C-alpha cells in the first residue's frame, strides 16, 4: 500500500511557509513600533479560580463553586505565564492531575490514576480521542498547540452523560481563543518570542485579530525548535530534540441577534520526534530496544463549525449544532536493536463528528440539556520494510487493520434543579451504541456492536455563603477500540503486541465527596474519591519471545482495579497584593486478578503537589516562586517493575524550586525571566521515559499593537 498522507498536506505546508515568512518579516516592526496594551498589561498570575466560570462540567456557564463536580481550571494568565512546551505540561502540579512524559515533544495527563484512552480529551467540546488511542500514555494531546489555548478545564471523575465513552478518569477540555466583535472595525497583532537553556528552545508565536460589529477573525502561527534535553547534573539526553509548526484560524459571524456562526481550523506537525525510552537503555537494559524509533511525522488537522441559536425568551435557552473533522497522522520510522531491517509505517485516523444540543431553562437555577452525538472514525494503516544491507524492500502487516472503522451514536440528557433551600440535585443518562469492525482480509476481520447505558448523579448543599458540600456518583464506560482489538508489532518496554478480537467493554464506578470554600481572602477545595474499575483491558504476557528478544503480549479483559485518593488545593490572597497557593494529591490503587491474587495498580502517581507565592514588586514587576514535589513511589505492579522507564526499586521522591519574573517595560511590552529547577536536581516523574529538565533559564518577550 502506498504511503498515506492527509488531504491537502502539501498545500497546507506551502501556506504555512508563506505565513511564517511574513511573520518573521513583521516581527521587528511589532517590537519597535507603537504597541498596544490591553493584552500585555500584567494581570494576576493566579486569579480567583473557585469563582471562575467553567462550561465543561455542566455544558453551560457555571462557576466552579456552584458546580457539584470536581473541576480544575487553568486560566489564560496561568497558561501565558507557564508557556508549556507541550500542552499537558500546563497541568503539572494542579489539583487532581499528574503529568507523564515518555519523550520531549509528547506528554499525557493522568486523572485519578487513569490515563490514555481512559481519559477523554476534547478540543472546544469535540473529541480528540480516536480509535487508535491506547490505554497507556499517548502523544496526541501534544499535537494541540499550547500557544493557541485560552483555558484548560478538567473534570475529575467520570463524565459519562455529556461526553460518553473514554470519560472514565475524567475529561480534559481544551478551549481555544475566539475573536471578539467590536463597534468599529479594528486590527490587533501580537507576538511572543522565547528562548531557553535546558533544551535550547527557540519559539516564535504571532497572531492577528480583526473584528467589527458582525464579523470577527483571528489567526496565528507557532514555530518551535528544541535540541537535546539537558537534565539535572549536566547530562544531555541524545537524541531528544524535536521541532514543530502550528497554524490556527477562527471566524465568528453574527448576522442577527441570537444567531451565531463559528468556523475554525487548527494544524500542528512534529517533523521527527525521537522515542527516548526506545533509543536509550532504561532500567534493567544493557542495550536500547531500538536502533531507530522516530515519530516521523506526527500531525493533526482539525476543522470545526458551530451554529448557535439563542432565542432570548421562553424556556429554550439555546440550540447548538457542531460539525468537526479531525485527521491525525501517526507515521513512524523504527529499527530493532542490532537489526538491518528499517520499518516505515503510516497510520491515519479520520474522525468526523456531529453534535446537536439544546438547553432548556424552565426556572431559575434549573436547566435541562438534551443532545444527540455521532462520530465516525476510519483507520488507514500501512507498513513497509527496507533491508539496509541489501536494499530490498517488502510489504509488511500494518500496525492496525487497514480500513477498520469505529462508529458511535449516542442520546443523552443532563439536568440540574434546586430541590429545597440550599440544595441542588443533578442527574443524567446516556445511551451509546457502537459499530467496530475491520475488513475480513485484516487479521481475519471482526465486528463488534457493544452498547451501554451510563449516567451520573450529583448533590450539592450550600452550608453558608461561600461554603458548599457536594457528592457525585458516576459510571464511566469504554468499549474496546481499534488499538485494543487489532494492534500488531513492537511496543515500548521491549514488548511485541499480538491481536485479540474477543475483548469486552470496560467500566468504572466512581464516588466522591468534597467541600469548596470561597470567602474573604481564602479559597479551599478538598475531595475524597473512590473508583471500582472492572474488566480492565491490559497487556498480558503470553510467555512467548520474538526472535529479536521482545516479550509477546496480548490485550485481555484481565482484572478489577480499586482506586481511591484525595485531591486538595488552597489560595490565600494577602492585603498587600500577594497570594499564597498550594495543592496536594494522593492516589492509591490495587489490582485484583480472577485467581484471587492482587498487586499494586499500574503507574499510580506518588503523593505530589505544589506550593507557591505570587508577589507583586511594584506596578510593573511581578514575581512568582513555587515548588513542585513528589514523594517516593515503590508500590509497583509487575508490569511497572519490568518497564525500562521505571526503576524496579521505585521512583525516588523529588522537589523542584522555580522562579519567574515578569516586567511590564511599557504599556505594550512585557519581558519575562524564568528559572526552573534552581538546584539542578536530576529527577524523573513517575512513569515517565525521560528525566525532567535540569537548571533551565527562559527569556521571553510579549508585544503587540
Image (tube, rainbow, N blue to C red):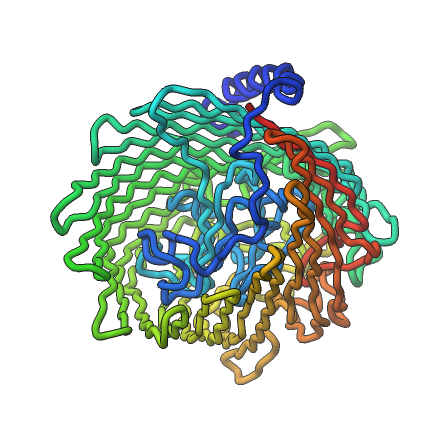
Q: Where is residue 369 in the image (x, y as percent from the top left)?
A: 23, 55
The reply to whether residue 386 is in sight is no
Q: Which of 525 and 495 is in front in this view?
A: 525
In this view, 508 is above or below 492 = below
Disc tally is 0
Please give left or right for residue 379 compared with residue 227 in the image.
Answer: left
Which residue is at a point 54% across and 70% down the rendered structure image? 568
Q: Which of 154 and 278 is in front in this view?
A: 154
Which residue is at a point 68% across and 55% down the rendered structure image? 546
Q: Position of residue 497 (x, y in %)?
A: 58, 55
Q: Residue furthest left?
A: 314
Q: Residue furthest right?
A: 234
Q: Position of residue 104 (x, y in %)?
A: 69, 45
The reply to whether residue 39 is in sight is yes
Please give left or right for residue 69 compared with residue 581 in the image.
Answer: left
In this view, 106 is above or below 454 = above
Which residue is at a point 57% across and 50% down the rendered structure image? 138
The quarter of the image holding the C terminus is top right
Please give left or right for residue 299 compared with residue 407 in the image.
Answer: right
In this view, 578 is above or below 343 = below
Q: Nearer the viewer, residue 236 or 165?
A: 236
Q: Nearer the viewer, residue 332 or 252?
A: 252
Q: Position of residue 285 (x, y in %)?
A: 80, 59
Amino acid at each position: 500500500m502506498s504511503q498515506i498522507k492527509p488531504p491537502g498536506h502539501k498545500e497546507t505546508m506551502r501556506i504555512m511557509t508563506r505565513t511564517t515568512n511574513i511573520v518573521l518579516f513583521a516581527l521587528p516592526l511589532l517590537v519597535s513600533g507603537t504597541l498596544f496594551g490591553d493584552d500585555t498589561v500584567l494581570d494576576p498570575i493566579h486569579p480567583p479560580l473557585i469563582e471562575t466560570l467553567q462550561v465543561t462540567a455542566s455544558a453551560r456557564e457555571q462557576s466552579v463553586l456552584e458546580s457539584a463536580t470536581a473541576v480544575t481550571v487553568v486560566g489564560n494568565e496561568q497558561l501565558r505565564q507557564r508557556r508549556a512546551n507541550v500542552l499537558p505540561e500546563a497541568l503539572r502540579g494542579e489539583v487532581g492531575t499528574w503529568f507523564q512524559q515518555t519523550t520531549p515533544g509528547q506528554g499525557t495527563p493522568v486523572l485519578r490514576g487513569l490515563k490514555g484512552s481512559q481519559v477523554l480529551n476534547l478540543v472546544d467540546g469535540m473529541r480528540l480521542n480516536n480509535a487508535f488511542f491506547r490505554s497507556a500514555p499517548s502523544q496526541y494531546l501534544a499535537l494541540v498547540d499550547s500557544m493557541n489555548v485560552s483555558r484548560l478545564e478538567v473534570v475529575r471523575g467520570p463524565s459519562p452523560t455529556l461526553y460518553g465513552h473514554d470519560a472514565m478518569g475524567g475529561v480534559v477540555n481544551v478551549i481555544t481563543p475566539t475573536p471578539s466583535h467590536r463597534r468599529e472595525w479594528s486590527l490587533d497583532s501580537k507576538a511572543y518570542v522565547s528562548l531557553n537553556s535546558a533544551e535550547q528552545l527557540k519559539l516564535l508565536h504571532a497572531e492577528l485579530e480583526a473584528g467589527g460589529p458582525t464579523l470577527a477573525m483571528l489567526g496565528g502561527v507557532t514555530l518551535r525548535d528544541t535540541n537535546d534535553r539537558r537534565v539535572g547534573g549536566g547530562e544531555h539526553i541524545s537524541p531528544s530534540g524535536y521541532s514543530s509548526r502550528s497554524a490556527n484560524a477562527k471566524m465568528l459571524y453574527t448576522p442577527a441577534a441570537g444567531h451565531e456562526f463559528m468556523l475554525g481550523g487548527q494544524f500542528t506537525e512534529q517533523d521527527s520526534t525521537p522515542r527516548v525510552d526506545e533509543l536509550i537503555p532504561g532500567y534493567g537494559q544493557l542495550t536500547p530496544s531500538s536502533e531507530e524509533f522516530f515519530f516521523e511525522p506526527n500531525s493533526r488537522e482539525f476543522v470545526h463549525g458551530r451554529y448557535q441559536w439563542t432565542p432570548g425568551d421562553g424556556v429554550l435557552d439555546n440550540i447548538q449544532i457542531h460539525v468537526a473533522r479531525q485527521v491525525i497522522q501517526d507515521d513512524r520510522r523504527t529499527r530493532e536493536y542490532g537489526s538491518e531491517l528499517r520499518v516505515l509505517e503510516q497510520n491515519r485516523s479520520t474522525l468526523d463528528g456531529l453534535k446537536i444540543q439544546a438547553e432548556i431553562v424552565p426556572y431559575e437555577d434549573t436547566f435541562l440539556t438534551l443532545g444527540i452525538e455521532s462520530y465516525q472514525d476510519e483507520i488507514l494503516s500501512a507498513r513497509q520494510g527496507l533491508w539496509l544491507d541489501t536494499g530490498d524492500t517488502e510489504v509488511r502487516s500494518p500496525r492496525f487493520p487497514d480500513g477498520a472503522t469505529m462508529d458511535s451514536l449516542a442520546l443523552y440528557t443532563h439536568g440540574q434543579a434546586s430541590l429545597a433551600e440550599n440544595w441542588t440535585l443533578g442527574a443524567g443518562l446516556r445511551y451509546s451504541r457502537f459499530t467496530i469492525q475491520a475488513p475480513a482480509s485484516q487479521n481475519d476481520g471482526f465486528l463488534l456492536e457493544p452498547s451501554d447505558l451510563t449516567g451520573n448523579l450529583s448533590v450539592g448543599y450550600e452550608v453558608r455563603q461561600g461554603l458548599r458540600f457536594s457528592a457525585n456518583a458516576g459510571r464511566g464506560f469504554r468499549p474496546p477500540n481499534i488499538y485494543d482489538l487489532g494492534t500488531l508489532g513492537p511496543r515500548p518496554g521491549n514488548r511485541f503486541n499480538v491481536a485479540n478480537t474477543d475483548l469486552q467493554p470496560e467500566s468504572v464506578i466512581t464516588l466522591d465527596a468534597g467541600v469548596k470554600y470561597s470567602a474573604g481572602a481564602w479559597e479551599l477545595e478538598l475531595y475524597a474519591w473512590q473508583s471500582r474499575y472492572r474488566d480492565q483491558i491490559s497487556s498480558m504476557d503470553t510467555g512467548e519471545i520474538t526472535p529479536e528478544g521482545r516479550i509477546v503480549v496480548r490485550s485481555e479483559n484481565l482484572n478489577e482495579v480499586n482506586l481511591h485518593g484525595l485531591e486538595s488545593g488552597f489560595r490565600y490572597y494577602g492585603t498587600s497584593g500577594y497570594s499564597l497557593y498550594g495543592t496536594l494529591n494522593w492516589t492509591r490503587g490495587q489490582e485484583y486478578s480472577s485467581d484471587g491474587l492482587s498487586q499494586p495498580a499500574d503507574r499510580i502517581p506518588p503523593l505530589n503537589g505544589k506550593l507557591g507565592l505570587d508577589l507583586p514588586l511594584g506596578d510593573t514587576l511581578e514575581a512568582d516562586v513555587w515548588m513542585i514535589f513528589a514523594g517516593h513511589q515503590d508500590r509497583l505492579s509487575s508490569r511497572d517493575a519490568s518497564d525500562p522507564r521505571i526503576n524496579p526499586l521505585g521512583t525516588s521522591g523529588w522537589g523542584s524550586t522555580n522562579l519567574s519574573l515578569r516586567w511590564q517595560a511599557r504599556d505594550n511590552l512585557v519581558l519575562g525571566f524564568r528559572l526552573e529547577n534552581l538546584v539542578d536536581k536530576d529527577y524523573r516523574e513517575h512513569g515517565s521515559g525521560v528525566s525532567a529538565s535540569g537548571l533551565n533559564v527562559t527569556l521571553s518577550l510579549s508585544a503587540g499593537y
